[in-house]
């Protein structure tokens, strides 16, 4: 069965510190992996997807098939990065989310 | 361009009452999803649809029914509401083709069952 695991419920850092939000998945096929973000009082929105290999707002995520991981990284956190982050996996039809990690960036 | 719109935004139900949540999208997406969001549980898939007239069960389908009579609408029904169904419900839609599967979300419906 497909599963997405985000082991940290809360991650607190100071502004300028590096950030890594962990995501591990279980899926036997070739998944599509995403990071979605939910800022306070806003709807969920796509942050980035593995297939694009892009950097959005300074965030990057690399798919590691050997470790079945898709960790989200940013070298220098900003206060405006404070939000709820969800890792998601899509197979043919279903879009499954992890439990989310709340990132708090202190000034 | 409205994107994904959910109706209503808030609702309070008494145990045993029924209600229907409406999700409408204007992007001609094939796929539509209903999730519930609970503290510490993340987003859990209730039901989904891969096209007009089709529906399928997600991770937590019990106590819910859905219908997709029109491509742009996806309805979530609670026949007999229970306090355990107190949650924030999100609808999402996306295209089908790999590489174009970004999901767009509605603003959420906060449901309280007393």
Image (cartoon, coloured by chain):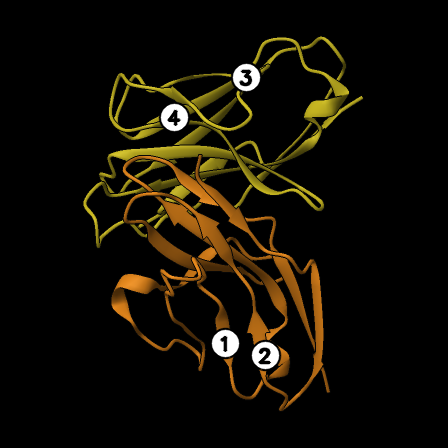
Instruction: Residue at 38%, 26% (x, y): give it.
Output: B74
Q: Earlier in the sequence, mark 2 or mark 1?
A: 2
Whole-angstrom CA distance, mark 2 to mark 3, is: 38 Å
- Badge 1: residue crowd in 10 Å (few <14, some 14–19, many ≥20): some
Instruction: Residue at 28%, 40% (x, y): give it.
Output: B26
Does the rendering let one see residue B106? no
Q: Which chain is yellow?
A: B
- Badge 2: residue crowd in 10 Å (few <14, some 14–19, many ≥20): many
Instruction: Give the label, 3 or 1, closer to the camera.
Output: 1
Q: Earlier in the sequence, mark 3 or mark 4?
A: 3
- Which disc is residue B64 wearing? 3
On screen, residue A24 above or below A28: below
Which chain does tag 2 point to? A
- Residue tagged by mark 1? A73
Residue B57 percent across, percent down from the top left: 43, 21
Give the SS element for disc 1: strand
Q: Are marks 2 and 1 in contact (CB under 8 Å)?
A: yes
């Amino acid at each position: 069965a497909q599963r997405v695991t985000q082991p940290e419920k809360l991650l607190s850092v100071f502004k300028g510190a590096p950030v890594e939000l962990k995501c591990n998945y279980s899926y036997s096929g070739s998944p599509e992996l995403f990071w979605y973000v939910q800022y306070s009082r806003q709807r969920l929105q796509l942050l980035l997807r593995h297939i694009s290999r892009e950097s959005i707002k300074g965030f990057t995520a690399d798919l590691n098939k050997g470790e079945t991981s898709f960790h989200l990284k940013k070298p220098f956190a900003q206060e405006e990065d404070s939000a709820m982050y969800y890792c998601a996996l899509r197979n043919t039809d279903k879009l499954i989310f992890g439990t989310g990690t709340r990132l708090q960036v202190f000034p | 361009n409205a994107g994904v719109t959910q109706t209503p935004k808030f609702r309070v139900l008494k145990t045993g009452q029924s209600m229907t949540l409406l999700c409408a999208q204007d992007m001609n997406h094939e796929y539509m999803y209903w999730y519930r969001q609970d503290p510490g549980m993340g987003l859990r898939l209730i039901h989904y649809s891969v096209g007009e007239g089709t529906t399928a069960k997600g991770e937590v389908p019990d106590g819910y029914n859905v219908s997709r009579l029109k491509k742009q609408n996806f309805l979530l029904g609670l026949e007999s509401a229970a306090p355990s169904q107190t949650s924030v419900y999100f609808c999402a839609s996306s295209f089908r083709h790999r590489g174009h599967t970004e999901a767009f979300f509605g603003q959420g419906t906060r449901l309280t069952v007393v």
